[in-house]
Amino acid sequence: MDRPSSFLLILAMASQSAAQGETTAPVLTMEPPWVRFLAGDSIILTCDAGRSSRSKNYIWHISDRGDIPGEERYPIKYASKNDTGVYKCKTTTDSSRSSTPYSNTIHVNVTEPDGSTTIESLPEILWANQNLLLRCNFTFKKEAIYTFFKEGSRLGEATVFVGSGTFEIERVSVEDKGRYRCELQFVNFTNGPIYSSAYTFVDIKDLPVRLSVKPDRPKDGDNITLSCECSDSDACGSGEYSFYRNNSLMNSDSVSHNVYHIRQATVMDSGWYHCSVSNSLTHTAKSVEMTVRVPVSCPDFFSVWGNSTFAIGARARLGCKSEQGTPPIHYLLSRDSQIIDNRTVTNARRGDFTLTVMSVADGGLYSCGADNGFGRMDQCGQPMRLTIAEHTVPSAGEIVYAEVQVKRKADGHNGKGAGTIPGKDDYYVTYATLKHQKMERNGDLLPRQEEEDNSSDYGEIYQNVRRS
């Protein structure tokens, strides 16, 4: 087959494939998928025509109204009886005038509320944190199943033998504001009619009282003022104010009845606080967590390993610790009054700094400071002078050889028997040198831990050297 013929065949196949794609009918869905809607419900119809990248035009057909151009979704925000009908859809593309077949059909049935059924909400004026009572009333008092809805979503149901059906929502919030309705069906007539009320709007006012704390970030020794502020004079009026800490009532010692004072606060005053005002109703403010912060104390500065002289190549570990202060605590390490490192600790009081000695210039006068946002203590403690020895830390081979020689001396060897390293003379290695080398290889161990470790060769070597 020559090239032009191949090209024409491929083009014909592509055209046929496109034509087949356009003849696929879309799928129509409805949310929520109810058989019957009440006037005021929200409905969304979706015309799903697949995920083709080509632009589509949507056409909706509603009963005898003909074709109506639209979008992929057909929303009905507040349904009415006029929205009742049979819905279907189809699509066309920008590149073709032909359209797909119609989708499946969906029947939307919207009914008006029955005049014999009503819903009421109590209390009429509703504040946040109060309980909302919904009552569904019907003209005839018979055993029935009452179902309650918010914005079309089912909340719950109750079976009542005689009287009205009720549903309670405890401690409402502003998010519970909206439209509510109810419906009922007689117990002995499960296939009988369903009676629905109209929607009623329930408004919920936000809390009229609020607790404020000044200063908002109190520290140890501060005088703190708690104020219970009311935004609605009708709700609060000349009501009685009460203050609570961790749900325990406190006695106010201030002249103003809506203010509580804490003088020279301590950490013991930290906790959850709220206030309330009681008039015809009791309104309670949201709880506020108050933490009394403690400024940091002057930190202690020390060498974790106990020494202040280090060889080039060795590691120095320096500790900084404030005995008081609310975490997190930010520690600062300085050399000759210049900050060279910092770290923050949250779950411990001590912050450690590990330095690798690179040259004699790393020596100097070291100090540490602390800051937690409520107080800063810098260069207040006793500084430490680090001295750098000009000799370097022995190499790994020299350390091993030294350990072998000390071990052999402890076993009574003269250094000239089997196992001696040729070309090396025996030499004396002090306990302090071995201990320093041990710390260099296992820097996280403290000296006292090493001295107690008698199960290793190091422990045996240390003990032998110490006896010598």
Image (tube, rainbow, N blue to C red):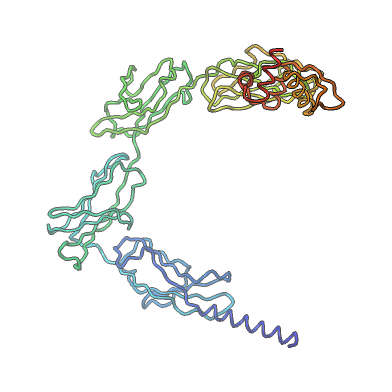
Q: Which residue does the image show at 46% across and 23% down from the upper left?
A: 215
Quarter occupied by residue 434: top right
Q: Which residue does the image show at 34% across and 35% down from the upper left?
A: 208
**Vertical placement of residue 129 versus 252, above or below:** below
Of 199 and 414, the residue lying toward us = 414
Residue 83's spot in the image, x, y percent? 34, 69
Residue 129's spot in the image, x, y percent? 31, 39
Quarter of the picture containing the C terminus is top right
Quarter of the picture containing the N terminus is bottom right
Left or right side of 172 for 145: left
Of 450 and 18, the residue lying toward us = 450
Left or right side of 19 for 318: right
Left or right side of 386 for 195: left
Q: How many marks?
A: 0
Of 445 and 430, the residue lying toward us = 430
Of 342 and 416, the residue lying toward us = 416
Mark yes or no: residue 362 visible.
no
Left or right side of 71 for 55: right
**Vertical placement of residue 228 versus 153, above or below:** above
Quarter occupied by residue 442: top right
Q: Which residue does the image show at 67% across and 82% down from the upper left?
A: 10
Residue 306's spot in the image, x, y percent? 66, 16
Mark yes or no: residue 194 visible.
yes
Residue 206's spot in the image, x, y percent? 35, 40
In the picture as drawn, the residue positioned furthest to the right comes out as 423
Quarter occupied by residue 109: bottom left
